[in-house]
Amino acid sequence: MITLATPGVPGGAFVAFSALLLQLGVPSEALACIIGIDAVMDLFIGVVNCFGTMVSTVTVSHREQLLDVARYNEMP
């Protein structure tokens, strides 16, 4: 339940993850080590999120027969 709102929010995963770790009794000093890793991971999460949105948009429009395939193939 804690991670439902994190995919669309940059840095949101760290907030949810830190709340979870604090509830599990992990010291807050350990979060300083994790934030450096999370910044890099957040870049990749954003790329995967954008790519997934693009693929799903093309897939749905193709299945609904709204995609002009000839025009799509002409694009650079």
Image (cartoon, rainbow, N blue to C red):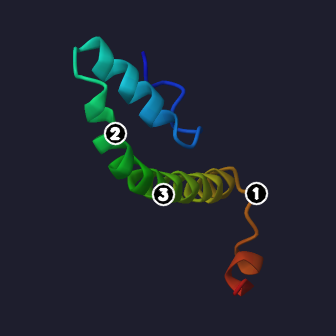
Please name the residue that numbered disc 1 is placed on.
Answer: 66
Q: Secondary structure at mark 3?
A: helix
Tell me the SS state at disc 2.
helix
Pick whichever, 50 or 16, lies toward us: 16
Residue with the mark numbered 2: 32
Please state which of the two labelled residues, at mark 2 or mark 3, is closer to the viewer.
2
Q: Circle 3 sits on which residue?
A: 43
Residue 29 in which image quadrant: top left
Task: Choose the circle earlier in sequence order: 2 or 3.
Answer: 2
| Badge 2 vs badge 3, beta-carbon distance below 8 Å | no
Residue 65 image-quadrant placement: bottom right
Is 18 located above or below residue 57 in the figure?
above
**Alpha carbon distance from label 2 to label 3:** 18 Å
From the viewer's side, name the closer residue of 31 and 16.
31
Q: Nearer the viewer, residue 29 or 4?
A: 29
x, y percentage for residue 61? 69, 54
> In the picture, which quadrant includes the N terminus?
top left
Considering the image in quadrants, where does the C terminus appear?
bottom right
- Amino acid carrying label 3: it is Leu
Which three-letter amino acid code belongs to the residue tagged 2? Ala
Q: Position of residue 62 (x, y in %)?
A: 65, 58
**What residue is drawn where x is 54% and y is 26%?**
5
Q: Specify few, some or many for label 3: CA neighbours under 10 Å numbering under 14, 14-19, or 20 or more.
A: few
Q: Amino acid at mark 1?
A: Leu
The percent position of residue 39, horizontal first and vertical second, equals 44, 51
Q: Nearer the viewer, mark 2 or mark 1?
A: 2
Query: How busy is the neighbourhood of tag 2: few (under 14 within 10 Å), some, or many (20 plus)?
Result: few
> Looking at the rendered structure, which numbered label has been put on residue 10?
none
